[in-house]
Amino acid sequence: MYRPNSLWTWAFIIIAIIQAAIVLAFEAYVFGIFQTHLGKDARKQTEARTIPTYLTLFIFGFIYELILVYDALRLKNTIQVIGLCIYNTGLLIYAAVQMEQIQKAVLALFGKNPAFIDRSIWSESQPFLVAVPCIIALGTVLMSVVAWKLYDEFAWTIYKHISADLRMKRRYLTFQIYIALLKFDFFFFLGFTVQFVVIVVNTADVEFALTVAAIPVTIIILALAAFWTRRENKFGMIVIIFLYFAGLAYFLFKLVRMYQSSHEQSYIPARRSLTTFAVITVILIILTIVNACVCTANFNKGLKPHIASRKLQSEDEKGTMTEMPNLAHGPVPSRMTID
């Protein structure tokens, strides 16, 4: 089991844990007071579902971040460490959006029927909801500083193991970026879909069913994307890239649909949050498509043995996924590992 073994690896994981602990405590408190102040007759209202969904998704986002932090340090994956700083920025944006959406939901419930919710809930929860973006902003700055230090720290290990071929280094970097993108794609794909399924009502049965079916399909696609990239399967990658374009079309369709006058009423309770997730997801899909194409173009150019031969042997060698093993003494027998 990996254990941080330097000042900066400890600093990065401690910052992530402290940030998550404080934010999760605040979110859990807001969730608790919302549930206690919510009237029984209000639970069927759409606005009553938005707040638990936002808070639950936010909690999952930080738990997932802690998993990715451990994974990045274990693998000494510089790309993923940098990606986590960007991911934290995404959570910061979501925290700001969440605060406004929760206020609107509380006021909407109270406006429909004062018995639905105690209006004082907003004054009680507002200080905690304001504090959350501030804490995340501070955490993002600290994580970025430590990430810069980790880049220097991991550099020696990278140069110790990597091939001298600069073209091979670029291919491996592209592969690492692609694998990291897949990990971040998972959260934002899932986050949008869960919000849509739980919050949005009055949608066509076929559309709703397709959205529910998209959850397991997305997980399978992302898993196959990583698998076929490591195996350098061109046909599989062509299929995956086609599915990426289909996913891109789906999210663009949703973005347009949310603002159409004939459908916007179904999306209003969560439109700001859904728009945030959809825009981030569209950007991620475009980046993923570009990297998938470059990775496919790099097939059969000598990268596969470097990927397949990676083996964690000791505490010092653990987590060199960002580094390529030295194959000067010949290729190591193929062995696939999972990031």
Image (tube, rainbow, N blue to C red):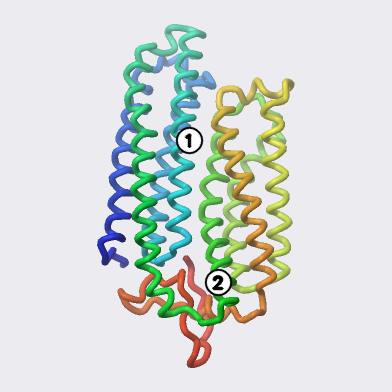
Residue type at the position of mark 1: Tyr
Position of 17 relative to 294 (above/below): above
Decide which of tag 1 and tag 2 comes sooner along the chain.
Answer: 1
Residue plotted at (63% across, 68% down): 228
Position of 131 relative to 36 (above/below): below
Residue plotted at (55% across, 34% down): 195
Mark seen at residue 141: none
Residue plotted at (50% across, 86% down): 327
Residue 271 is situated, as x and y percent measured from the top left of the image, at 59, 27
Residue 299 is situated, as x and y percent measured from the top left of the image, at 66, 74
Relative to 241, 153 lies left or right: left
- Eye-nearest disc, 1 or 2: 2
Residue plotted at (42% across, 57% down): 81
Cα distance between the residues tagged 1 and 2: 32 Å
Position of 113 relative to 276 (above/below): above
Q: Residues within 10 Å of mark 1 (few under 14, many from 20)?
A: some
Residue type at the position of mark 2: Tyr
| Snapshot quadrant of residue 194 | top right
Which residue is at the front of the view, 297 or 40?
297
Query: Element under label 2?
Result: helix
| Snapshot quadrant of residue 1 | bottom left
Mark seen at residue 172: 2
Q: Residues within 10 Å of mark 2 (few under 14, many from 20)?
A: many
Whether residues under marks 1 and 2 lie with C-beta atoms below 8 angstroms apart, the answer is no
Relative to 10, 227 lies left or right: right
Total labels drawn: 2
Residue 15 is situated, as x and y percent measured from the top left of the image, at 30, 49
Q: Which residue is mark 1?
A: 94
Residue 133 is situated, as x and y percent measured from the top left of the image, at 39, 34
Position of 206 relative to 318 (above/below): above
Query: Element under label 1?
Result: helix
